[in-house]
Amino acid sequence: MRERILIVEDEPAISEAVEYALRAEGFEVEAVDDGNTALAQARARAYDLLVLDLMLPGLSGVEVCRQLRDENPVPILMLTAKDAEVDRVLGLEVGADDYVTKPFSVPELVARVRALLRRRELDTRQAIAKLRVGGLELDLAKHQARLNGEQIPLTAFELKLLTLLAGEPERVFSRGEIMRHLWDSSYVGDERACDLHVSNIRRKIERDPARPERVVTVRGSGYKLQAV
């Protein structure tokens, strides 16, 4: 079955170019041009990935992403304005898995889409166990996480990052190691994205995110997971 992708973009030239390129790669593609329609469609149909513009009529891309993340782990590739770092940070904070800045190369976007889908497929094939570190339990088969018995919403990247750390508690992983694991390749993307994913995880699993006890920073080295 072909992967189904939803493009959410209100600039016709960009939407049409991306749609054409993805169809040429064999994907099943649908496109909408406003946030309200995108949210309704993403809830009503099963998509394998969303290409989501940040600035949209109606609901913004940020709000679409935020609402979907409460209920759906679908990978989200966000389109942001050139050199607008605050937009990239905001997109990752609300649950986007990756971002591409405008103007972008369509072949690069297609490559990012394929990388996200490949990572999701690998995650599914490897999801055969449960991991427990203190009060944190990761159910890899169901793509779920629980903290002291209560389910916590994690994005695909956040779950994959925690799975890496939970596989070897107390071991320090560098940002580069973490990003290579997230991408399943030597491509590490922007290592600052690692810090943003960790920050998001801390907001969900720490009693006090400003004083983390589970996902701990080891200055100059990286991060490790501790049992609490």
Image (spheres, helix red, strand yellow):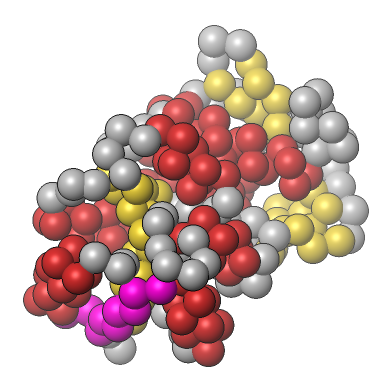
Q: Is residue 227 above or below residue 153?
A: above
* Among the 4 quarters of the image, the one containing residue 12: bottom left
Drawn side of residue 126 relative to residue 171, left or right: left
Give the total of numbered labels. 0
Classify the position of the N terminus by image quarter: bottom left
Looking at this view, name the residue that lies furthest to the top: 220
Drawn side of residue 209 relative to residue 75, left or right: right
Question: Is residue 44 inside the magenta stretch?
Answer: no
Q: Residue at x 54, y 10 (%)?
A: 220
Name the one closer to the observer, 55 or 170: 55
Q: Residue at x 48, y 48 (%)?
A: 91
Instruction: Please say whether residue 97 is visible from this viewpoint.
Output: yes
* Among the 4 quarters of the image, the one containing residue 219: top right
Q: Is residue 154 above or below residue 40?
A: above
Drawn side of residue 133 relative to residue 177, left or right: right
Classify the position of the C terminus by image quarter: top right
Q: Residue at x 61, y 36 (%)?
A: 198
Residue 68 location in percent, x, y? 58, 68
Residue 166 location in percent, x, y? 66, 42
Residue 143 location in percent, x, y? 62, 66
Instruction: Please say whether residue 25 is visible from this viewpoint.
Output: no
Looking at this view, name the residue that lies furthest to the front: 57
Q: Residue at x 18, y 63 (%)?
A: 14
Q: Is residue 159 above or below residue 70?
A: above
* Among the 4 quarters of the image, the one containing residue 85: top left
Question: Is residue 27 inside the magenta stretch?
Answer: yes
Range of residues picked out in magenta: 25-34
Name the one closer to the observer, 178 or 12: 12
Residue 161 location in percent, x, y? 56, 44
Q: Is residue 127 above or below residue 213?
A: below
